Amino acid sequence: MNLNATLFAQLVVFFVLAWVTMKFVWPPIMKALDERAQKIADGLAAADKAKADLVHAEKKATDELRRARESAADLRVGAEKQTAQLLDEARAEAARIVAAAREAAETEAAAASQRAKEALREHVAQLAVAGAEKILRKEINAQVHADLLAQLKSEL
């Protein structure tokens, strides 16, 4: 055989094989590579989106936490104000009750004092009447009258 014919046959077989490979084998391989490249690109895009979502979620969580702290602080301030107001009202009510009790006690003491004075006046009046009655029953005698008045003085 001739070297040129072998070389020519090998070239023909090589080009036929290259053509068959390019026509039937190469497109599925390229399609698979393109699909894989697309999946990788989609995965990277999803990872970037997830990272951006994470940053956004962290920012949102930080904002919510800040708002919650502010709300809690507002609630605490409101509760403190309400507590102070309730304490002031309770103190005022206690002061009113104490004043009313003091006034009632003073009124009762004044009434008791007045009753005691009235009872004492009544007792003095009874003694005076009794003394006058004793004087009028006895005969009129200056010495006896003076003795009776002295006795009345000692009784009063």
Image (cartoon, rainbow, N blue to C red):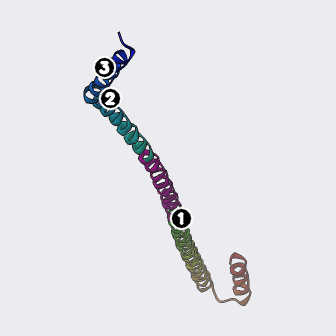
Q: Which residue is mark 2?
A: 29
> How many residues crowd mark 1 within 10 Å: few (<14), some (14–19), many (20+)?
few
Q: Which residue is mark 1?
A: 77
Q: CA distance from mark 2 to mark 1?
A: 71 Å
Closer to the chain start, of discs 3 and 2, is 3
Q: Which residue is mark 3?
A: 13
> How many residues crowd mark 2 within 10 Å: few (<14), some (14–19), many (20+)?
few
In the rendered image, the residue lying farthest to the top is: 1
Snapshot quadrant of residue 41: top left
By secondary structure, the bulk of the magenta-drawn segment is best described as helix
Q: CA distance from mark 1 to mark 3?
A: 92 Å
Snapshot quadrant of residue 13: top left
Snapshot quadrant of residue 130: bottom right
Query: At label 2, which amino acid type do we have?
Result: Ile
Q: 9 or 94, which is in the foreground?
A: 9
Residue at 34%, 20% in the rendered image:
8
For this view, does 27 lie left or right of residue 47?
A: left
Q: CA distance from mark 3 to mark 2?
A: 22 Å
Q: 20 or 107, which is in the foreground?
A: 20
**Element class at badge 3:** helix
Residue at 54%, 76% in the rendered image:
107
Query: At label 3, which amino acid type do we have?
Result: Val
Q: 119 or 4, which is in the foreground?
A: 4
Residue at 72%, 90% in the rendered image:
142
Which marked residue is nearer to the observer: mark 3 or mark 2? 3
For this view, does 49 lie left or right of residue 131?
A: left
Q: Which residues are magenta?
A: 49-78
Check the image and report above or below for 141 versus 108.
below
- Give the total number of marks visible in the rendering: 3
Closer to the chain start, of discs 1 and 3, is 3
**Element class at badge 1:** helix
Residue 73 lies within the magenta run: yes
